[in-house]
Amino acid sequence: MRFTKSPSPAAINAAPIGAPHCSAPSRQSVGITVIPSGVFEARNLSGISTYRNFLPLALLLLLPALALATKHPHYGGTLRIELQLAKVSLDPREWKPGTLSAGENSKLAALVYDRLLTLDDYGRFQPNLATDWSHDPAFKTWQFKIRPGVKFSDASPLTAKEVASALQSLLPSGFQVSASENSITIRSTRPAPDLLEQLASGRYFIFRVLSDNTLVGTGPFVLDDADTKSLAELTPSAAHPVHIKFRSNEDNWSGRPFLDSIDVTLGDPALRQILDLQVSRADIIDISPDLVRKARQDNLRVWSSPPFTLLALRFDPAQPAASNPLLRETLDLALDRDTMANVLLQRQALPASALLPQWLSGYAFLFGNPMNLDRAKQIRASLPANVAGAADPLRLRVDSTGDLMKLLGERVAVNARQSNISVQVVSHGASSSPTASSPAAGLHLFAWHYDSLSPRTELLDLARYLHADLNPESLPDTLDPDKLYAEERRLLEQREVLPLLLLPDYVAIAPAVRNWSVAPSGEWRLADVWLEPSQPAASNSSSPQTQSPAPGVHP
């Protein structure tokens, strides 16, 4: 039996105002009674008489806890989630590292799949589908013992062969996975000291491929049969939102989830989601940073994560001016990241001067804010006037749809203009290849979602996306932060990418949702969520103390 851990700060912050900050119950730990050690200590120190004298005081201290213990987690109900996700895929083999869709899809995939191991709220690796693991001194060979008695949702047993097949399709080149009777062995051509961090996050779920190419997992929920085959064909939009439903896995190896089912709506616009939460048509919604302030003003219960998304500028040599190193330095010095975070995004973002966030690397604070407008003007004056001038501006393509990215692109153009650089924001459909109808864009505004708990892996994936000169052999074989810091600084000094902002994930939660928590990798722990039953209306509705709170208001 696993005992309940203390709640994470994120779980405490998500609790309704007035709710007790007690340990969050898990499916394996409901019903455990804790007796204060002081009762037994008193008897040991002073005999039976002291114990009798201390007993009334102990009972008084226990009364609040006993009162709280009467509200047990409730089984049953359907959790209604509304997401702005435009496309859904539960096949981890299709996910591209760093994309926003991969981050959103992993939240849904965590309902139906499990990983070999997980990371708890205290940074410790915990067994999941693997019960234990070991490695050689060089970190090139890893062995994982597979948990016995686990079944996929189609009732087929989990075997080491199935685990090896799933991981082999997900791990990058240089890894070889083999299976024995009840364990798997992962061999790497180079030392992999961060393999546990990789396997506990990102797309490294365990699944079984059926004959029709659909996937089944061992997770706490099962995708409804009606949605299984049509999932890839779904095209959610504001005009035509779509629904997918997950039902509880009654035979889940870690215990039945509290919820009976989860109904997910995709494609609803942001303002409609807020309205649905206020009128009790939704229980959980995702919120863009520019609407967080409105949600809080409407007394909604808003949870925020560590920053999981990087917004940055990437230079593209398709436009000749973008290859000029002095022009890149000028733009970097002219960008006012603090104003973008504090004014444009109303303090719901953080200015970024590093590629990796502080929570992931531990050294991001060493990169200072590079803004220096006077120096930017001096460098610009040394450049020819026709470089990124009014006649041939530096074209900025926004690589994502949405008002937030467009506003940020316009702010970049304003900052550039202050240093006498002309930047023109072009539509999302503009191509980096020059054509008669769409000239080449030399600057891209993109979003990068942090998928891995390994800073080394994340830095390498980001460098690959940027087509930067970063060879895997140049990255250290250890997790030495000094060496990782030196490699990241080298990337930033090339100024092929300019970090702008770091965005947390924001979620608004209905008052009836209990035991909300999030894994360090960003997935929602919906298997431990339960819904508080609605209270019957009081007979005397004139009394203000007995009236139910308005939708969206803290109890």
Image (spheres, helix red, strand yellow):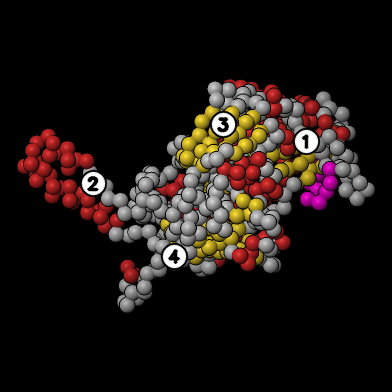
Specify the segment rendered in magenta. 419-432
Amino acid type of the residue that numbered disc 3 sits on in the rendered structure: Trp
- Which numbered disc covers residue 76? 4
Q: Secondary structure at mark 4?
A: loop
Q: Position of residue 372 (x, y in %)?
A: 68, 29
Task: In the rendered structure, find residue 35 and report the number of the disc placed on it.
Answer: 2
Which residue is most to the front?
Answer: 181
Q: Earlier in the sequence, mark 1 or mark 2?
A: 2
- Other residues around mark 3 within 10 Å, as few (<14) / some (14–19) / many (≥20): many
- Does 73 sit above or below residue 449? below
Q: Which-is-in-front pick, marks 3 and 2?
A: 3
Say whether residue 41 is visible: yes
For label 1, the residue is 315
Q: Amino acid at mark 2?
A: Ile
Q: How far is disc 4 from disc 3 in space, using C-alphas?
A: 41 Å
Q: How far separated are the C-alphas under marks 1 and 2?
A: 62 Å
The question of residue 104 being in magenta is answered with no
Q: Secondary structure at mark 1?
A: strand
Judge the density around disc 2: few (<14), some (14-19), many (≥20) Cα neighbours within 10 Å.
Answer: few
Q: Residues within 10 Å of mark 4 (few under 14, many from 20)?
A: some
Which of the labelled discs sits on residue 142, or is there none? Answer: 3
Q: Residues within 10 Å of mark 1 (few under 14, many from 20)?
A: many
Residue at point 72%, 52% (across, down): 401
